[in-house]
Image: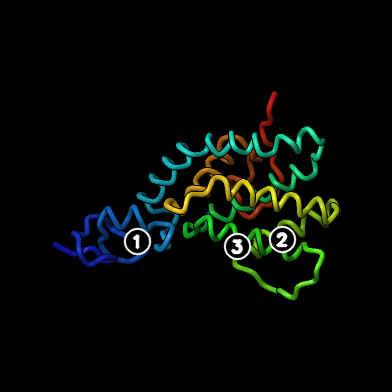
Amino acid sequence: MSLCIYCQQRTGKRACPALGGLICPVCCGQHRGVEINCPVSCKYFKTHESYQRARLGEEFHLLWIKETESLYKANKERVLDLIVLLEMLIYRFYREHALGTETDVAEALEFLKRRLGTIAIIETTGTALGTHLWKGLEERLQQEPLSQTEALEAVEKSLQILQIFSDAAQPRRYLHGLLGHVERHFKLPPELKESPQLIATPQIITPGS
């Protein structure tokens, strides 16, 4: 019997393409996508992700509706559009990257806050996700100029939803919820499924629609 390539204690029972050996189910379950950079094609990763997104997506969506209700009532459609865009960009990023936690998303959103802040901060680069979000946001703002206040409000609301939904004991809980929410409730353009690189703003099913 081969020992788990990760913990070197339990018996390795699953072929781990990321580590190139056999991993035990416990380590696979605890560390995939958190400390192990699984390929998105891994059958164990895909099965687990599908289950968690289905389980948490609706819970996230209900929270999303609650937390954005004030924006609907205030007719802040452009702020809502930016929130949807940010969620779409996060979704697209994690279609290609398995490794990530809510901490990574929080750092990326904080990076956007600093870039959009009223005080000039010299910060040329962020994390891969932060750079990805900033590039997508910049492209959108070039197409439809928005006020700094509106952009900041969208980022801050996204951070607020993340903080409420997060659970320190489940470092990917927010991602599972958001990705499930996007897959179930966004009217994604058909071409997005063919090309993850396409930047588009989807529509979201809103209350009463």
Quarter of image, res 26 = bottom left
The tag earlier along the polypeptide, 3 or 2, is: 3
Q: Quadrant of the N terminus?
A: bottom left
**Up-down: is 55 above or below 119?**
above
200 left or right of 45 in image: right
Classed neighbour count for the residue bearing mark 2: other residues with Cα under 10 Å, few (<14), some (14–19), many (≥20) = some
**Up-down: is 105 above or below 71?**
below
> Label 3, on which residue?
107
Q: Residue at x 25, y 61 (%)?
A: 22
- By what rule are the colours in the image chosen? rainbow
Q: Amino acid at mark 3?
A: Glu
Q: Position of residue 125 (x, y in %)?
A: 67, 72
Classed neighbour count for the residue bearing mark 1: other residues with Cα under 10 Å, few (<14), some (14–19), many (≥20) = some
Q: Residue at x 47, y 57 (%)?
A: 98
> Label 2, on which residue?
113
For label 2, the SS is helix
Q: CA distance from mark 3 to mark 1?
A: 28 Å
Question: Label 1 near label 3: C-beta < 8 Å?
Answer: no
Q: Amino acid at mark 2?
A: Lys
141 left or right of 126 in image: right
Q: Residue at x 70, y 46 (%)?
A: 83
Q: Residue at x 52, y 49 (%)?
A: 166
Q: CA distance from mark 3 to mark 2?
A: 10 Å
Q: Amino acid at mark 1?
A: Pro
For label 1, the SS is loop
Q: CA distance from mark 2 to mark 1?
A: 37 Å
161 left or right of 52 in image: right
28 left or right of 113 in image: left
